[in-house]
Image (cartoon, rainbow, N blue to C red):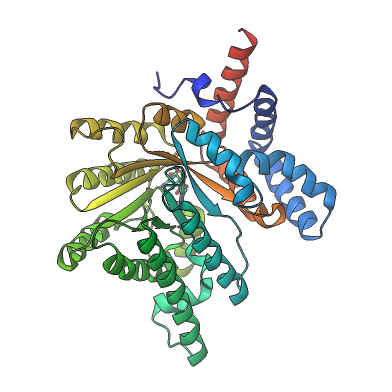
Amino acid sequence: MSIFNDTQIAFQDKSTEQLKKAYWMFKTIEQPVITDLGIKILNFTVHNKFPFVEGIVRKTLFEQFVGGETREKSMEVVKQLFKSHIGSIFDYAIEGKEDEVTFNHTCEEIKQNIKFAQGNPAIPFVVFKPTGFGRFKLYQEVQAGAALTTSEKEEWSRVRNRYYEVCKLAHERNVVIMIDAEESWIQTAVDDLVNEMMAEFNKEKAIVWNTIQMYRTGRLEYMAEDLKRAENGNYFIGYKFVRGAYMEKERERAAEMKYPDPIQPTKEATDQNFNAAIDFVMAHLDKVAAFFGTHNEKSTELVMDKMKEKGLVNDDPRIHFGQLYGMSDNITYFLGAQKYNASKYLPYGPVKDVVPYLTRRAQENTSVAGQTGRELILISKELQRRKNR
Ligand SMILES: Cc1cc2nc3c(=O)[nH]c(=O)nc-3n(C[C@H](O)[C@H](O)[C@H](O)COP(=O)(O)OP(=O)(O)OC[C@H]3O[C@@H](n4cnc5c(N)ncnc54)[C@H](O)[C@@H]3O)c2cc1C
């Protein structure tokens, strides 16, 4: 039996009303056809400003997966989570806009998050997405070694400057900054920028953290190279480990463009690679700190076991766990209760702007095998428990 089975702990912050609503919602997004259709309708109606749709979204998907419309409005959730020893990682969830005004605005928002997080244990990390700071196609060109025009060169230097400013501020304020991982055909460009920032700002401790997707081939080799660089450059490494969110897209592109599939051949191979990452961390704790972003119970338990084997205390500052807000509360609340370093990614933003994020959550819950089923079983169990009290 899973150790993450205590639904009373998992849902202590949810009213019965909220649980019933969550049950209904997961039940709906369990159906791929309904989800696909719903997403199309949602994108269209929100785009065309149908006010009643915004109201429905706010009361359903938004309430389940988002902290609030602003950082300040999300503070109620932050405080609530922290009572259960769970940190919040503000995730400015606006996606898909690709102009300089938006990039600058996002950069400012991340800086505000750093200032907000300074000295606040309830907000242990700040995060940003690479495509929040620059155009996807530009990253792609840089990675491919394309000849940039003068204006593109200037544009790229503005992207680099956003990374630099944010990481510099994080270093000054002693706040850890994590950078999300995206598609493999831009990730090398991202890795290079992040490495540059690590070398500059991680001399005393890991302030800048990269994300490693273990569904990719060759990532262990990449980490070994990173480690050598860090040893030579005398700095620390911080990694968020995830399995990876863009598998279908990655496979499709590789097949279409006839290059080797960059993704592990099977789920088992991805799982093994994730386990190998845990071993890598445990073997290099003098240099490496890690955040395991996963909803997988086995992976989480394995990290806990390895920590025990190593004689680490539960809240060893080098080991963190994280799940997305609105999902896998059974894992996060269990970890919090045991005083592990557990956090939730807490997205925030205006309803209409977080719709792409919400639709990705809905799609992921439909496509990641077993995830929605797990949520439904846990919610039913808790509803039953409350009924029998
Ligand atoms: C806090 C947090 C932060 C995250 N940040 C990022 C990020 O920055 N970038 C990012 O890309 N994702 C990110 N993710 C999403 C993550 O990569 C996974 O998509 C998601 O968490 C599901 O994986 P799992 O380990 O939770 O669960 P599991 O259900 O154990 O694993 C599902 C995952 O396994 C892999 N997989 C499934 N089938 C196969 C197959 N046939 N062959 C090979 N591999 C397969 C896929 O990666 C799939 O998503 C984040 C997740 C969390 C919780």
Point out the residue furthest to the top here. Answer: 388
Residue 241 located left or right of residue 52: left
Image position, residue 90 (x, y; %): 52, 51
Point out the residue furthest to the bottom here. Answer: 150
Callout count: 0
Point out the residue furthest to the left here. Answer: 232
Tell me the quarter of the image containing the N terminus: top left
User: Which residue occupies 72% across, 55% down?
Assistant: 352
Q: Foreground residue, 355 or 349? A: 349
**Rendered view: 281 above or below 373:** below
| Quarter of the image where one finds residue 108 | bottom right
Instruction: Answer whether residue 67 is visible to the viewer in this image.
Output: no
Residue 228 located left or right of residue 179: left
Image position, residue 257 (x, y; %): 46, 69
Image position, residue 33 (x, y; %): 69, 42
**Rendered view: 6 above or below 292:** above
**Rendered view: 281 above or below 305:** below
Instruction: Answer whether residue 164 is visible to the viewer in this image.
Output: yes
Image position, residue 206 (x, y; %): 29, 56
**Rendered view: 263 above or below 31:** below
Tell me the quarter of the image containing the C terminus: top right
User: Which residue occupies 29% across, 69% down?
Assistant: 200
User: Which residue occupies 73% across, 44% down?
Assistant: 58
| Quarter of the image where one finds residue 64 | top right
Q: Foreground residue, 297 or 261? A: 297
| Quarter of the image where one finds residue 126 | bottom left
